[in-house]
Image (cartoon, rainbow, N blue to C red):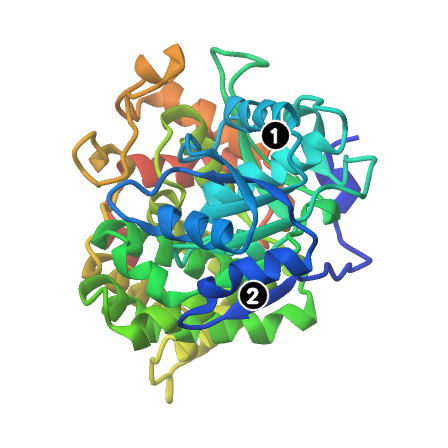
Amino acid sequence: MQVDELLKPFPLKEFHPFPKALLGPGAHEMIGPEALKLGFKKTLVMTSGLRGTDIVHKIVESMKYHGLEVVLYDQVESNPKDYNVMDAVGLYQQNNCDSFVSIGGGSSHDACKGARISVAHDGRNVNEFEGFNKSENPQNPPHIAVSTTAGTGSETSWAYVITDTTTDPDNPHKYVAFDDASVTSLAIDDPVLYYDCPIDYTAQCGFDVLAHASEPYVSRLNFQPSLGNALHAIKLTAQSLRAAVWNGQDLAGREGMMYAQYIAAQAFNSGGLGIIHSISHAVSAFYDTHHGLNNAIALPRVWAFNMPVAYERFADIAEAMGIDTHGMTKVQAAEAALAASIRLLRDVGIPERFIDVTQDSYSKNRLGQGPTKYYENAPTIVGDAADVDRITNHVLGDACTPGNPKECTFETVRPVVDHCINGDLDDLLS
């Protein structure tokens, strides 16, 4: 049975738990005592390395100061791959570790979640756990997630996203695993750690937040406990993202985005997502582009696609973004929200189409780098009919698609994908 047949029309709602969290300036300095309280003795730290900063070094040394043994795996890639997860699992098992710490953004946290699930199942391949609550052992090693970006909210959600490069090496597949057993033991969000985040990366992560907040607000699930959090996260993003991007050591901007990403993740944790994320997953699978960048490019197109079935909700989003909607109809207010999203995208300097994304277009770009042969040979986004078709088909199989408020078929979604790749944003405003 297909996932959409299992989930739609969502007659029952399920609330998924959040972990304990420490939030605020200086929170990362508590990692040693908190790890000891959780029983950590020998910990595998998973991270991308955060090269150019001393964040990993400082946190590792703090843990050692408190008597913890640390094994470091610092090879997690953007859009974490199955081999990242399994390499970490092997390192964990070889060193007889008993716990995990992830340091970074969603890639580090997601890879770590996958590794924990694999470890709990004697090292089975992480790709076996794609889908909803596929793990069979609810007990897995404790995990502290320390965030250095305001983006995915993975440190507080029940989801993790992995790219399967091995099942079909010629057609990589990026999937979402939703699993209550993957929820971290402790989330640490410290806005001071965001200060080193590059300008463009901050912007892209911020649009991940806006997608996380807006999609559950208009979702087919219509999960009432998520709606307030969703709107507040939209408000915080509209208020804080420009300052966080262009004045990276502005504490108010960084802290606003810290709370926005945390609250947005709590919204989608039970309120669901939609095809902004499905499109992002598909493009990442084929081109290894940054998830937040993909969300930013897809968001205005998907908002325009979904508006005819959710004008009132998008009118609420307009107000949350600071628009004075007095005297506007719901349709006019919804269109004003769309215009505000495009204005924000342009204000923070994000490319507007996927064909505008090149190897030199942003600092975290991995186009053409590999290490798999597939990614070495697919360095640029093509955007021809075959490319649009394969991305559309990936979207239709994504676990986020059933939550989209407007029905998704190949015929309805393909033009949206094509516009994301090749279209002009000004067309949406005319």
Comparing 281 with 385, the one in front is 281
Q: Is 6 rendered above or below residue 300?
A: above
Comparing 155 with 134, the one in front is 155
For label 1, the SS is helix
Q: Residues within 10 Å of mark 2 (few under 14, many from 20)?
A: many
Residue at position x 57%, y 36% from top? 409
Q: Residues within 10 Å of mark 1 (few under 14, many from 20)?
A: many
| Quarter of the image with the N terminus in it | top right
Residue 277: x and y in percent read 49, 45
Residue at position x 70%, y 31% from top? 119
Find the residue positioned furthest to the bottom. Answer: 326
Q: Is 57 rendered above or below residue 229?
A: above
Q: How many numbered marks appear?
A: 2
Reading the image, the residue beneath label 2 is 217
Residue 259: x and y in percent read 46, 70
For label 2, the SS is helix
Is 38 displayed left or right of 176 in the figure? right
The image quarter in which residue 255 lies = bottom left
The numbered mark at residue 427 is: none
Is 30 displayed left or right of 292 in the figure? right
Residue at position x 26%, y 55% from top? 196
Reading the image, the residue beneath label 1 is 92
Comparing 231 with 91, the one in front is 91
Q: Is residue 308 visible?
A: no
Measured Cα–Cα span from mark 1 to mark 2: 39 Å
Residues at marks 1 and 2 touching, judged by CB atoms closer than 8 Å: no
Q: Is 149 rendered above or below residue 166?
A: below
| Quarter of the image with the C terminus in it | bottom left
Residue at position x 42%, y 67% from top? 258
Q: Is 191 rendered above or below residue 60?
A: below
Amino acid type shown at disc 2: Tyr
Amino acid type shown at disc 1: Tyr
